[in-house]
């Protein structure tokens, strides 16, 4: 079944949801404007906001729809009325297994991001109050020559502001790279699970008498 044939058989509700998802994605892209850089030295952008508000809701919506359809032993193109009970049972079992895999991969991805965030937060503190009260420690961790800066006439407030700026830039740089890698792997794995499940469902349906 090619892509055009698939979409031509979708019901009105699924077509509405498809168009709505595309519009939501584009509106979130325009509102969050992820390419604009701001903050300390232009080191902060809005990609995190876009992923949270523009991508995750769409993924969650279609994931829930797909799971619900699986439990109902139906599919997205309205052929459940022509399926045998055995084929429907097989479809439900396959999607339950796929759901278990997706949940496992999601838990692993979230755990990886959480661990990475905690690690970066500990190694690159960006709280001005903490940096100001622990300026010697933060400067030592970054290899910053604190005494030389003081001799050059910089106050501790100026040095602390610089360290906060430098840590925030490094934090954003590393966090963005980690987020891209984890998200890319997650999307590839999830789509692989979905594609494999749909292919097995299709093969099983064709073999049914």
Image (spheres, grey):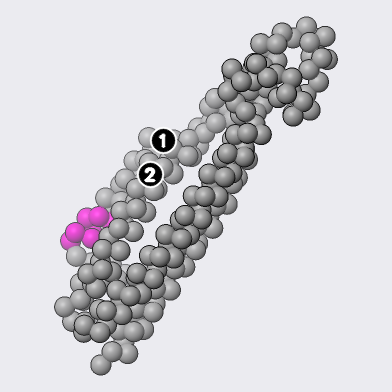
Question: Crowding at label 1, few (<14), some or many (≥20) Cα neighbours within 10 Å?
Answer: some
Quarter where residue 39 is shown: top right
Question: What is the x, y in percent for residue 199?
Answer: 39, 77
Question: Residue 88, relative to residue 209: is it above or below?
Answer: above
Residue matched to label 2: 54
Question: What is the x, y in percent for residue 56?
Answer: 39, 48
Question: What is the x, y in percent for residue 44?
Answer: 55, 31
Say whether residue 117 is left or right of residue 65. right
The extreme bottom residue here reads: 209
Query: Which quarter of the rendered picture does the C terminus lie within?
Result: bottom left
Q: Earlier in the sequence, mark 2 or mark 1?
A: 1
Residue at 30% from the left image edge and 47% from the top image edge: 23
Residue at 53% from the left image edge and 44% from the top image edge: 114
Q: Are marks 2 and 1 in contact (CB under 8 Å)?
A: yes
Residue matched to label 1: 32
Q: Nearer the viewer, residue 34 or 177?
A: 177
Quarter where residue 93 is shown: bottom left
The main secondary structure of the magenta stretch is: helix
Question: Range of the magenta residues?
Answer: 12-18
Q: Nearer the viewer, residue 2 or 115?
A: 115
- Please check the rendered image and state whether residue 31 is part of the magenta-colored stretch, yes or no: no
- Please check the rendered image and state whether residue 16 is part of the magenta-colored stretch, yes or no: yes
CA gap between label 2 and label 1 equals 9 Å
Question: Crowding at label 2, few (<14), some or many (≥20) Cα neighbours within 10 Å?
Answer: many
């Amino acid at each position: 079944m090619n892509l055009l044939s698939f979409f031509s058989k979708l019901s009105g509700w699924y077509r509405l949801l498809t168009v709505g998802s595309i519009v939501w994605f584009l509106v979130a892209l325009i509102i969050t404007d992820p390419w604009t850089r701001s903050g300390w030295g232009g080191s902060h952008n809005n990609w995190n906001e876009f992923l949270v508000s523009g991508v995750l809701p769409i993924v969650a919506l279609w994931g829930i729809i797909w799971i619900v359809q699986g439990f109902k032993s139906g599919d997205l193109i309205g052929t459940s009325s022509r399926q045998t009970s055995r084929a429907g049972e097989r479809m439900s079992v396959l999607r339950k297994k796929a759901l278990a895999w997706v949940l496992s991969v999601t838990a692993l991805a979230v755990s990886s991001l959480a661990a990475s965030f905690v690690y970066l937060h500990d190694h690159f503190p960006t709280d001005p109050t903490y940096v100001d009260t622990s300026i010697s420690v933060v400067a030592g961790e970054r290899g910053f020559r604190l005494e030389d800066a003081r001799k050059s006439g910089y106050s501790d407030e100026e040095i602390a502001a610089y360290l906060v700026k430098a840590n925030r830039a490094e934090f954003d740089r590393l966090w963005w790279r980690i987020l891209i890698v984890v998200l890319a792997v997650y999307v590839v794995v999830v789509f692989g699970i979905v594609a494999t499940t749909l292919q097995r469902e299709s093969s099983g349906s064709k073999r049914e008498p």
